[in-house]
Amino acid sequence: MSVFILVCPSDELLAEVRESGTLIFSSATTAAEAIWLEEQGVDAIIAQGVEAGGHRGIFLTDDLSSQLPTKQLLKEIVERVKVPVIAAGGVGSAQDVKDLIELGASAVQVGTSFLLCDEAKTSPLHREALAASTSPNTVITNIFSGRPARGIVNGMVEKLGAWNRQAPSFLMQLQHLPFAFSCRSVELCRLHAPMVWDQYSGLQSNFCRVTN
């Protein structure tokens, strides 16, 4: 299975992926994107609600007001496409999964709720931020990567604002903020990185807990 966000790749690459027998999934944040993806021949669509953490899969528009809550987005997409739809965003309990399946989802994708699992590659600082509050303050911001993404409000967001038109373009921050993305010392990161660390999180981080 290959999963794409931020738009499907070229027809040539898709053809190569299909020839290998791999299923192609891609994320949609609007019904229009879902329709477009189905026209490209994807095998399933991930309906990414606005509650989802991390990068938004938005690609047909830059208008963030088009981003809908997961349940509303799911209903709009399943009415318009025939391929299976996977619901993602704000999923933190068995009841959430049940509700989304009843609304037409073929499957449900969970992300933030697993970030404190031992198997997750979540950084120590990110784990601290997730565990520090029953509901960390999150916002959709472009200052970490140049693309809209939901993350925990930190010093950089507070100083520059969640949405900053002067933010470097997509992935340029890897060149301009190398320390933030390569910090290996937990103590050094704790001292410096809270200003710039990209601590992504969805809205249901209150379900993200470590249990024995």
Image (spheres, rainbow, N blue to C red):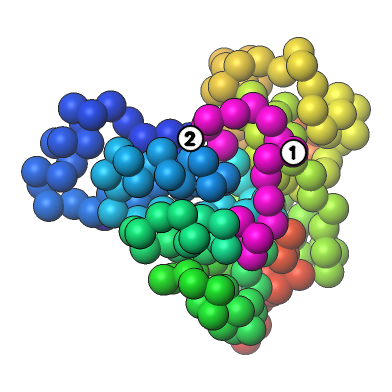
Which mark identifies residue 6?
A: 2
Instruction: Identify the image quadrant of the C terminus.
Output: bottom right
Give the residue type that dot 1 points to: Ser
Count neighbours of disc 2 (C-alpha within 10 A) and say few if under 14, some if 14 to 19, many if 20 or more.
some
Residue depicted at x 16% and y 36%:
15
Quadrant in which residue 97 is drawn: bottom right
Residue 70 inside the magenta-drawn segment:
yes
Give the residue type that dot 2 points to: Leu
Residue depicted at x 76% and y 13%:
166
Location of residue 64 in the rendering, given as x and y in whole percent from the top left corner: 71, 36
Count neighbours of disc 1 (C-alpha within 10 A) and say few if under 14, some if 14 to 19, many if 20 or more.
few
Residue 194 inside the magenta-drawn segment:
no
Pointer 1 or 2: first along the chain: 2
Quadrant in which residue 14 is drawn: top left
Which mark identifies residue 65?
A: 1
Residue depicted at x 64% and y 27%:
62
Taking depth in this image into account, of 131 and 63 the one nearest to the observer is 63
Taking depth in this image into account, of 199 and 141 the one nearest to the observer is 141
Q: CA distance from mark 1 to mark 2?
A: 17 Å
